Amino acid sequence: MEKPTSLIIIFGATGDLAKRKLFPSLFHLYRKGKIGNKFAVIGVARRPWSQEQFQQHVQDSVLTSLGQAEDIESFVQHFYYQSIDVTDSSSYVQLNELANKLDVQYDLNGNRIFYLAMAPEFFGTITEHLKADGLTATNGFKRLVIEKPFGHDLESAKQLNNQIREVFSEDEIYRIDHYLGKEMVQNIEVIRFANALFEPLWNNRFISNIQITSSEVLGVEERGRYYDKSGALRDMVQNHMLQMVALLAMEPPIRLTTDEIRSEKVKVLRALRPIKGEDVHRYFVRGQYGPGAIRNEMVPGYRQEANVDPESNTETFVAGKLMIDNFRWAGVPFYIRTGKRMSAKSTKIVIQFKDIPMNLYYKMDQPLSPNLLVIHIQPEEGITLHLNAKKAGQNMETTPVKLDFANNSIDGMNTPEAYEKLLYDCMRGDATNFTHWDEVALSWSFVDEISKVWESTREEKFPNYAAGTMGPKAADELLAKDGFHWWPVSDFEVQSK
Ligand code: NAP
């Protein structure tokens, strides 16, 4: 396969994202031979580093992340640095000169990727200058990679979108939702559409409910300033959680093309029942962590974290019940929950099948367990199918058994980082695993109604869950009202070699 050629300009190249994700991912692609020698990277940030300092920084980032250095010297030779304040109009001319020079030097055909690894308030200014100062006037392709958050609500997202659409067309915009680069999120589609076993059952006749949990053990760390204005709903639900719902619920696309898949996902988001006004209290639960113990060590509550308002009304936990009003899903609740400072770091999807019509093996003290399909997104990657089988012995008693598949149990399988896949997709022009504007807009309209209610009513019970637990009691009651319970994430460890 032809190797992609491109100049990648990373705005915010001295920052955390570039260090932890972008440089190691590019190095992986380089080592695997997926990108050849026809690529160059310009790092942009304010601090007055020399090119050598920047190359050393790239090298250190790769070593810290991967612990190996083969080919690292030749890799870092592709990296250049421009010390620029992106708000200073005059600096883009210089940047363009370097871009033109590297274009010729590396034979890049004018292909340019602009990666905005910076705070969103700069996105508009940068894209404006890219056009005004000629950086986008290139003979090759021009693509914009943009990090979350994409706006703060629908209105601000629209404004941002209008700004960047002045310079880039929709198909040149790659909005990152790094969950879409995760191996097991991409696997949802394959599990569903490549197995005769599941697709016929994937509807309201056979599925009783679907649960998606994305829990973190960490608190807000150094992100307090951003997070206190955002909260879990905007930070996790608007993007990652709703994207997973869309992948689980969409109709089979007629082809595996970007447009066909997106169009099916958009239909799901359009079918999401809007939750407004009083209903927000019935369908959604918000939580905020107080002090508690994590691995036997006391940690502070959210309001005691750095850069957080000591009376903050921001949620660090959300649980919700989503209904998709279409033929396939009418009546099936999709429960989502996500939060910080929970007892386990885990992203899992549990598909609970309906009980069989009659239980021949029923005993008062031993009801049959429902069949479950568990998709392990992270940190373990795999699937588990929970079935009932005969307990060995004389009696016809049942016992639950698990069929496990763990990605890392396949010899030599080393699943690539999400960013590695997404960067490669972008270089090849495949936008399937990036979010389209229609998805962003629909997700914001859904989430905005909930934020509106939460922001107008102070939650007097905050903090309402202790750090190190799985969230407030109300999140359990949300399912109990429907006769269900959260499947504990700790029960679902996949057996790996
Ligand atoms: P960060 O560590 O704060 O880095 C910000 C970068 O922007 C630095 O390189 C900084 O360098 C540069 N910068 C700031 N103001 C500038 C200016 N006026 N002109 C030029 N450069 C400027 O942020 P980050 O964590 O890497 O995050 C970047 C973006 O990715 C954000 O939108 C964030 O929400 C998103 N994101 C990050 C992560 C993550 O894991 N870190 C995950 C998901 C999304 P100087 O100080 O040298 O100028």
Image (cartoon, helix red, strand yellow):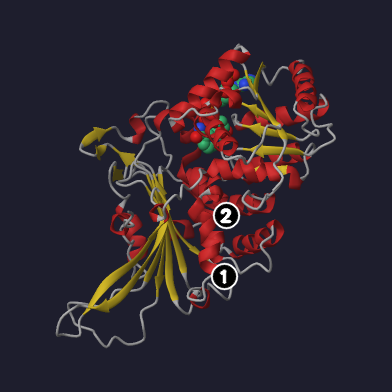
Q: Is residue 428 left or right of residue 313?
A: right
Q: Is residue 437 left or right of residue 57?
A: right
Q: Is 203 above or below relative to 334?
A: below
- Residue 48: horizontal and vertical position, in percent? 61, 11
- SS category of the residue bearing label 2: helix
Question: What residue lies at 34% left-to-right and 61% top-to-bottom?
Answer: 486
Q: Is the CB–ligand 1 distance for label 1 below 8 Å?
A: no
Image disc number at residue 446: 2
Residue located beneath label 1 in the image = 325
Residue 382 location, quadrant: bottom left
**Amino acid type, label 1:** Asp
- Residue 291: horizontal and vertical position, in percent? 27, 36
| Closer to us: 295 or 34 | 34
**Amino acid type, label 2:** Phe
- SS category of the residue bearing label 1: loop
- Residue 167: horizontal and vertical position, in percent? 79, 36
What separation in Å lies between label 1 and label 2 (alpha carbons)?
14 Å
Q: Is residue 158 visible?
A: no
- Residue 52: horizontal and vertical position, in percent? 59, 14
Q: Is residue 334 visible?
A: yes
| Closer to us: 28 or 446 | 28
Image disc number at residue 113: none
